[in-house]
Amino acid sequence: MPTAVMLAAGRRSPFGDFGRSLRDVPLARLGAHATRAAIAAAGLDPARLDHLVFGNVTPVDHDGYFISRKVALEAGLPVESSALTVNRACGSGTEAIASAARLVMAGASRLGIAAGGENFSRVPYLVESARWGAKRGPVTMVDGLDYTYRCPIGRELMGDTAEALADLGDYRREDMDAWGLMSQTRARAAIDSGFLARQIASIEVPEGKGTRLFETDEYPRTVTAEKLASLRPAFREGGRVTAGNSSGVTDGAAALLIGAEDAMDEAGVAIEARWVDAVTVGVEPHVMGAGPAPAIAALLKRNGLGVGDIDYWEINEAFAVVNLHAERVHAIPRELTNLYGGGISIGHPPGATGIRMTITAMHHLADTGGRRAVIAMCLGGGQGMATLIERV
């Protein structure tokens, strides 16, 4: 029989708003913080871990291109352990989980960590002509974030692809704003109830001449339908995509323990869920937000399941139109989707987002006694990814 892959002890940093609480915290420190928190939550000796997979889209800081190894060693993994960095655009967090799971299934790992994160606040400006072309005169600096937020195929902004999906499905601005309001309301309720606090490991951040404890996601807003309706389109004159129905630019990191069932048992780790499968499919890049719908279809078909067999859904709110599209295609119940907020309210650092969503799904299944959850997202460049987990 194939090796059963188990999940446990997910933890993350609070997600910081762009340019605010986490802007002076190196990404490696964020990643190591989340990883140490997951290890501590599992009550595990880090010397038992043999692999760390780190999801990251936008490298920052001097160690950005070696981030997985830096995080692993700073988090206390043994020097003999291995490290891997993966980038699958907005699905980089779930790809870190899938890659770590497949290493376990292949027998290349017994007990490891899937982690990931971004610190968009630390992305530098670039001078593309400086090395060879700047002979004399002024040069132009390019925002490094432009590399992240533009489609690599058509060079349009990701928000433009959301507008294209809204055109394709004739999705209404009012419905997109309603989703945005729902996300903010649900996130606030999840903060107030303490649900999100269960997955957050507070972190010391610089402030003035000292530090302070950063404990709660700082992107969620208190908004009204009237306020959302008043926002101007962000990407197209007369368009439907606004800051209120799009994901927030945030910084943060997350981590999750992944291992073979017997290895977790031997280490005394309390198993929370089983990783079953993950599927990635391609879609037209100019409507990349369509990606979750066919990915969900492929995942369910491969596992002999229907929409009614899924007890909970986490579908990334890159843009509200992404969720409206997946919901329409599959008749996914809104009352079983993103009940604790999402990318619009909590924010979307791609290396961490999929791990945050998985932790949320694990906690929801544990709280409600549900069996199965699907975690899905669209990916820049035109892909969709969907993951299936089960409570144990």
Image (cartoon, rainbow, N blue to C red):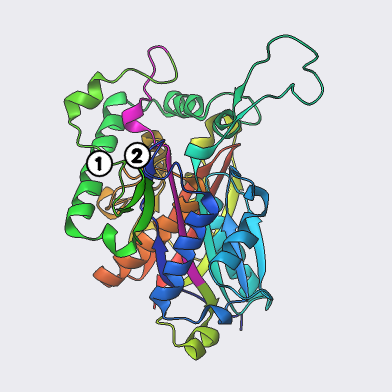
User: Residue 317 at x, y = what percent?
Assistant: 39, 42
Q: Is residue 338 above or below residue 123?
A: below
* Residue 273 seen in render: no
Among all residues in the image, which is located at the extreme front? 209
> Observer-nearest residue: 382 or 40?
40
Identify the residue at horizontal 28%, vertical 20% (top origin). Answer: 231
Marks 1/2: CA distance? 7 Å
Q: Identify the amino acid type marked 2.
A: Ile
Identify the residue at horizontal 74%, vertical 23% (top origin). Answer: 130
Residue 189 relative to residue 205: left or right: left
Q: Quadrant of the N terminus?
A: bottom right
User: Residue 19 at x, y = what percent?
Assistant: 41, 35
Q: Which residues are magenta?
A: 237-257
Q: Are marks 1 and 2 in contact (CB under 8 Å)?
A: yes
Residue 60 relative to residue 181: left or right: right
Q: Which mark is residue 344?
A: 2
Q: Which mark is residue 184?
A: 1
Residue 232 relative to residue 189: left or right: right
Secondary structure at numbered mark 1:
helix
Q: Earlier in the sequence, mark 1 or mark 2?
A: 1
Identify the residue at horizontal 29%, vertical 64% (top origin). Answer: 198
